[in-house]
Image (cartoon, rainbow, N blue to C red):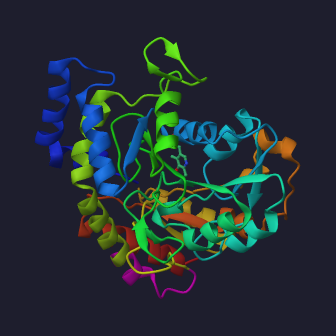
Amino acid sequence: MVDIRSQYLRLQPDIDNGIAGVLETAAFIKGPAVKKFREDLADYLGVPYVIPCANGTDALQVALMALNLNPGDEVITTNFTFISTVEVLVLLRLKPVLVDVDPLTFNIDPDKIREAVTPRTKAIIPVHLFGQPADLKSISEIAIEHGLAIIEDNAQSLGAKCNDLDGVRKMAGTIGNIGTTSFFPTKPLACYGDGGALITRDSKLAETMDMIINHGAKVKYHHEIIGVNSRLDSIQAAILSVNLKNLDDFIARRRRVAAIYDERLGSVPGISTPFAAEKNTHIYHQYTVQLDPSIRDSVQKQLKEKEIPSLIYYPVPLSLQKAFNFAGYREGDFPVTENLCKSVLSLPIHTEMDPEQMDYICTNLLNIIEHE
Ligand SMILES: *Cc1c(COP(=O)(O)O)cnc(C)c1O
């Protein structure tokens, strides 16, 4: 699905230099490489504050902790995403309120958010799924109308752009009160282990989050609030500064792959190719097609026989996960998400794909679909 090794080999001198620099100083925690990366990423995103942390799930947890919510407060989020959001909400004794998604973009549906707002709602967590930002303009309108905070989960779309409340184009993750992201090795901006970050324009939130990730302390052994241990280490930070310099090139490469898929698969009966709400907003973290549920699994099996990897993100809606049974959701509550779980298939897409690989994938997929 991704080719991290080839990407490393292409960037090897820079990456190796970065790692060697950290080894020489032996400043593995809170070293200069972390300071440099937070400044590099803040510059890239056009925000004053970036707070690196240990992973994208912690970033969500720290963001929620910084908002000072009370047990039982409701937080609206999408049903079609990775489990992290619901996990941290439940751990913090907050109430996840799931809503259905837009069938074209797969992102949280603003009309469904409106229907889900109650007097107990305190925040909205839109997820920018598969490389395409959610409709932050509409979501910001709802947030202002009801006095809600927005945390953008931008683990999958760092480098994508979207419109803010005033229709101004900004980097995804910089529009809500807090943006969160992950640097897991398969994410758009990746390190070689776990990593994550919080993004904000708010100096007070930045100060609080900086403390929370470091045991609630500004000064060592002086703990002002209850925090966690969630730091990005210096080796990962050094790798991230190199990858960040290449992020726009990574995105351009993914867009080229997506354009070839679009061209080869776009008008084939039986395949729906990804919808991009606006040109140049989608960074194609995934290239996710939809197939008829009656053939999807068989197509995937036949691709595998040809040694073509594919993945189903996500096979089960959050509402129907066993771990979340206690919430009482039932099959049929979220028709769009449930249908997507049965019809989506993500094809290989990464920065190192060559024309022959693409041709092999497309030719085989078309052949399989034709015979289904
Ligand atoms: C990957 C991901 C996360 C979690 O990030 P980790 O670094 O693996 O903890 C959270 N939300 C979304 C949407 C993700 O894709």
The residue that appears at 27% across and 25% down in the rendered structure is 31
Instruction: Say whether residue 290 is visible.
Output: no
Which quarter of the image is occupied by the N terminus?
bottom left
- Could you say which quadrant of the image residue 307 lies in? bottom left
**Foreground of the two, 94 or 309:** 94
Q: Quadrant of residue 115?
A: bottom right
At a point 31% along the width and 63% down the height, the residue shown is 251
Classify 228 as above or below 236.
Answer: above
Extreme front residue here? 204
Q: In the current view of this chain or complex, which residue is farthest to the top?
A: 221
Work out whether 322 lies above or below 320: above
Q: Quadrant of residue 119?
A: bottom right
Residue 283 is covered by the magenta coloring: no
Q: Residue at x 35, y 27 (%)?
A: 233
In the rendered structure, which segment of residues is drawn in magenta?
260-270
Residue 131 appears left or right of 290: left
Position in image of residue 113 (x %, y %): 73, 66
In this rendering, is residue 165 above or below 211?
Answer: below
Which of these two is toward me, 257 or 42? 42
Residue under the point 27% across and 50% down: 244
- Relative horizontal placement of residue 102, taking residue 272 as reference (left or right): right
Q: Position of residue 199 (x, y in %)?
A: 45, 48
Whether residue 268 is in magenta: the answer is: yes
- Residue 167 seen: yes
Left or right of residue 171, residue 44 in this image: left
Q: Is residue 14 above or below residue 320?
A: above
